[in-house]
């Protein structure tokens, strides 16, 4: 089966390409490389000893997307491509709405045109907003804390409406929590362009000496130590969750949380990193970041019940694998 992976050169996308290739799928990647590198795809090939097809395009470009669909007999789409920084979305909302929502519509339209009925969407726990934890799939969506969350909620609603109008169209909405870690080989991992927006690559770059210290955004939240609590999930657990969701996809809309079901605070993650790797990570407390909420973690029981999927790798493994990649990574 040929699977189109948008954003496949990025962090989660590249690890999912590994999981797909190892599961026997053929992979076509579409990525504009705004937050990914073609070299990452070469490493995916090296890891799996399998080839893939790459198109450097922006998936908001309907002509370019239709060209791919016309050239290949595509059996399913996994849509990762999108801007993903919560803070940046507050500062640049129009950019986020245009990129994240339009890309979903362009891809969905192409799927309907070419008879592709399997669509896995990369959503986010941010759609829950400031709901009561743990977050469960039946909750009302409250993503108004930031535009990024709104773009994911909008895309979910668009895809849901498309299924209502086209019953043969099958969609899996994967709301995942905070991906961290790297492939255990150390060949691929999280390598953001510029200063990282996410916690783990910031921690690893401080540990490596590329950055002076970690900024911890707020220590006055109502949490175990005042710092924000998140459900950190190993990126390979997340990647494997996409393959399982694709394998189990049936008609209709299916919504799943992909998380561990456990919350870890920023300082707890820093301590785990130090324990796993024997390296101190200097940090300072700074003001809260716009759009952030105190705590979120998953109720992941539905994915276990319906897909047979659970996260297997713990926080220590996440920290160890992230550091292995950072040590190996050359800009």
Image (spheres, rainbow, N blue to C red):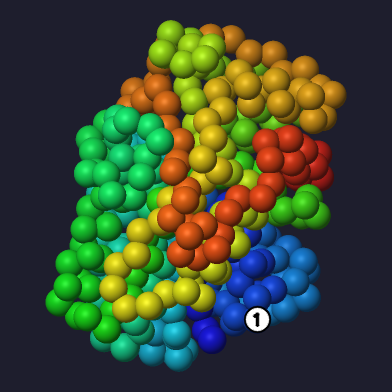
Q: Quadrant of the N terminus?
A: bottom right
Examine the rendered structure and indicate whether residue 249 appears above or below residue 74: above
Examine the rendered structure and indicate whether residue 289 appears above or below residue 313: above
Q: Quadrant of the C terminus?
A: top right
Q: Is residue 302 left or right of residue 264?
A: left
Q: Is residue 261 left or right of residue 21?
A: left
**Residue 168, visible in the rendered structure:** yes
SS assignment at label 1: loop
x and y percent of residue 11 in the render?
58, 52
Which residue shows up at 22% across the image and 44% down it? Answer: 140
Examine the rendered structure and indicate whether residue 234 appears above or below residue 229: below
x and y percent of residue 190 in the render?
63, 45
Outermost residue, front side: 305
Q: Is residue 18 left or right of residue 290?
A: right
**Which residue is denoted by mark 1 in the rendering?**
24
Which residue shows up at 48% across the image and 60% down it? Answer: 305
Q: Quadrant of residue 94?
A: top left
**Tag 1: Cα neighbours inside 10 Å, few (<14), some, or many (≥20)?**
few
């Amino acid at each position: 089966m040929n699977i189109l992976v948008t954003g496949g050169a990025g962090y989660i996308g590249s690890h999912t390409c590994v999981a797909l290739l190892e599961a026997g799928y053929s992979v076509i990647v579409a990525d504009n490389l705004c937050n990914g590198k073609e070299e990452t795809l070469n490493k995916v090939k090296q890891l799996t000893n399998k080839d893939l097809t790459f198109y450097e395009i922006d998936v908001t470009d309907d002509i370019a997307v239709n060209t791919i669909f016309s050239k290949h007999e595509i059996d399913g789409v996994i849509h990762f491509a999108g801007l993903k920084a919560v803070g940046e979305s507050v500062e640049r909302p129009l950019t986020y709405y245009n990129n994240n929502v339009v890309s979903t519509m362009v891809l969905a339209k192409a799927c309907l045109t070419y008879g592709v009925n399997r669509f896995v969407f990369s959503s986010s726990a941010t759609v829950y907003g400031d709901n009561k934890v743990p977050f469960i799939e039946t909750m009302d969506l409250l993503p108004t804390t930031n535009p990024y969350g709104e773009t994911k909620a909008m895309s979910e609603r668009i895809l849901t409406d498309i299924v209502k109008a086209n019953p043969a169209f099958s969609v899996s909405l994967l709301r995942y929590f905070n991906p961290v870690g790297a492939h255990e080989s150390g060949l691929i991992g999280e390598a953001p362009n510029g200063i990282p927006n996410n916690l783990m690559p910031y921690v690893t770059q401080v540990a490596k000496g590329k950055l002076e210290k970690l900024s911890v955004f707020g220590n006055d939240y109502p949490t175990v130590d005042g710092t924000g609590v998140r459900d950190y999930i190993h990126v390979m657990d997340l990647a494997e969750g996409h393959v399982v969701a694709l394998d189990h996809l049936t008609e209709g809309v299916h919504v799943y949380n992909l998380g561990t079901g456990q919350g870890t605070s920023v300082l707890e993650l820093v301590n785990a990193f130090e324990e796993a790797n024997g390296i101190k990570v200097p940090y300072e407390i700074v003001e809260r970041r716009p759009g952030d909420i105190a705590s979120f973690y998953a109720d992941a029981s539905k994915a276990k019940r319906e897909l047979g999927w659970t996260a297997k790798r713990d926080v220590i493994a996440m920290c160890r694998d992230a550091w292995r990649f950072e040590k190996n990574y050359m800009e």
